[in-house]
Amino acid sequence: MPVLDLSELNIILGVLGGFILLYGIISTKIKAKWYLGEALPAVFVGVLLGPIAAKFIETEKWGSAEPGQTNEITLGLMRVMIGVQLVIAGYQLPAKYLVLRWKEMLLLLLPVMTIMWLCTTLCIMATVPKLTLLAALVIGSCVTCTDPILSQAIAKGPFADKYVARPLREIISSEAGANDGFGFPFLMLATFLIRHANVPGAGEHGAEVEVEGRAEQPHRLLARAGATIASQGLRLMGRKEEEVGRLGGGVGVAMQNWFIETWIYQILMSVAIGAIVGFGAQYALKYALRRKWVDSESYLLYPLAIGLWLLSICGLVGTDDLLACFVAGNALNWDGAFLAETEERHDEVNSVMDVLLNFGGFMYIGAIMPWSDFNSPDTTGLTWGRLVGLGFLVLLFRRIPAIFISYKLMPNVCKNWKEALFMGYFGPIGAGAVFYVEHTRHLFPELGEGDEEETNLVAVMAPVVYWLVLFSIIVHGLSIPGLNLAYQYFDVEPIQDDAVELRRKSVHDATPPNAMVGDEENFIAYNRFSRPVFNVADLPTVRSRRQSLATEHARSMSRSRRSFARSRSRDVGPDSVPFPVPMPEKSRDESFRTSGSDDEEAGNRGAPYKRGRTIQYAV
């Protein structure tokens, strides 16, 4: 007899599939007209369907329904969601981008991130009670990084296509991809200082700490470094219960472990692993392409495969998988060949993977929001007023001061204070912060098992970080539509540089943002993000938008004349005029000329402005 199977799997599949169906019907409106993107609607639906409302998505009931399993599910899902998209973000940058912009990247990853970390810490201490400075530094490190997923939506979205200059978009995308992995040094510095602080009872429970090692000779310290990398580094991402908590040893031991475990083992080894995998995949694909061994589907799935494989390898050895994924994506497209080939194959696979991961990931984040912990004045001291104040303080002081201090040092990517304000304001907090706070749970004792400082930290870090994620998604998600309305009100012209031809995949394709119809088979698009090679001289140039529209009008009249001539050819004699005299067309030198033959029009259109390639409009 048929029964109603309300299993968790059936419910999740129905919810996700239904949301994608409804979103897809008006996706062009949502993205290109309303500029809402994917994160905000997905989080909103997740909140409605989560435990606080409809109770369709309850992660504590999934699988074996073990208590506390939501934390492990969240950590794993965020790793996959971010890692795969970091590989895609890496290969979509121009060839050798990290070398060409190494000064700007170094500036953004070290001094700018440090200022962001400290400013965020001060905001947290001003609004969240019962926290020490080190505890606030731990929470601040979780939200220091700009979210790579939301930043990619800002850097590559429809609004950026129209109004944000290409160099600024590229540096935002590259910074967000790299600094998500660079958040570990800030997190681990604060963690080691707490763990190795000399407080009463430190070291009584847990691993033995060799305090006398602080006075060792340099050659003995280097010898110990190798053993530490092998023994301690492998356990960094998943410490045993006895290795968390107060271990004692002082600042010297904390700095030693921070340098060896974090910088040498996590950061440097992650860069090495990502580079080896990325360059190896690049050479393997070139070899296979020359021999025509790889089909289109497998070629386009390579970034996904690299991301999943690196997550596995780095997870096994305990290194920074996010940084390795971004480095591998850059190495995969180091000479620009991979991106060029994907564009030739009209890659839609990786963009579809992006959208699918965003839908599922942000809907999940909306469903697991700890609403009950946002207002606990009797336990943690958090209230709605404190959290709202924290949100606005972080929005104003976390990133904007750091960018304004440093933007004059990177004039190639940020040319004026307006671009600096845009870059500083749009530093969203999202899935990356969720990953960091769930990872931080493994670095400290469970709630109630540590001392007062650790207990207060563990109690408030998840509500604070999740609130800032929600606040950022809402504020930044609504800022783009508001900014677009302001631009329209003040008649800000879209950027009309670097035009390229985009092949029209279907007659039903909507015109891309900041583009115009070229002919029946192509769009002419401006200010596009992806380009295989960073070479300004190779970028195409076109006439102004007014002249392009005039050219389109002339081509339309030419087609109408030919159609009219064919229809009258049977009835009109050889001495008759088959169509009216064409209207004069205004040329670039502001003089009027009469449109002649199609060949003459094509020649005149291609003559001026010989820098790089020139778009040849087909009639």
Image (cartoon, rainbow, N blue to C red):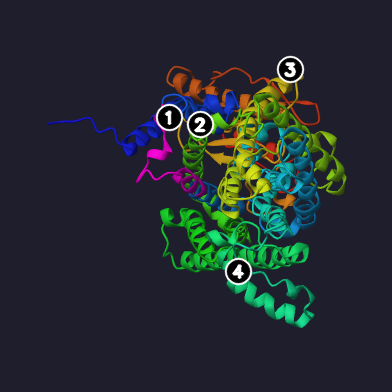
List the residue tagged with mark 2: 42
Pointer 2 and pointer 1: residues touching (CB < 8 Å)? yes
Rounded to the nearest angstrom, the CA distance separating label 3 from label 1 is 33 Å
Task: Give the residues in magenta.
Answer: 55-75
Rounded to the nearest angstrom, the CA distance separating label 2 from label 3 is 29 Å
Local packing at callout 1 (Cα closer than 10 Å; few below 14, some 14-19, many 20+) is: some
Quadrant of the image occupied by residue 386: top right
* Residue 346 appears anywhere in the view: no
- Mark 2 falls on what kind of element? helix
Q: Nearer the viewer, mark 4 or mark 3?
A: 4
Residue 19: which numbered mark, if any?
Answer: 1
Indicate which disc, 2 or 4, sits on the residue closer to the N terminus: 2
Pointer 4 and pointer 3: residues touching (CB < 8 Å)? no
Indicate which disc, 4 or 3, sits on the residue closer to the N terminus: 4
48 inside magenta stretch: no
Q: Nearer the viewer, mark 2 or mark 3?
A: 2
- Give residue 437's position: percent from left, percent from top: 60, 46
Residue type (three-letter) at the residue carrying disc 4:
Gln
Q: Nearer the viewer, mark 2 or mark 4?
A: 4
Rounded to the nearest angstrom, the CA distance separating label 4 from label 3 is 58 Å
- Give residue 231's position: percent from left, percent from top: 58, 72
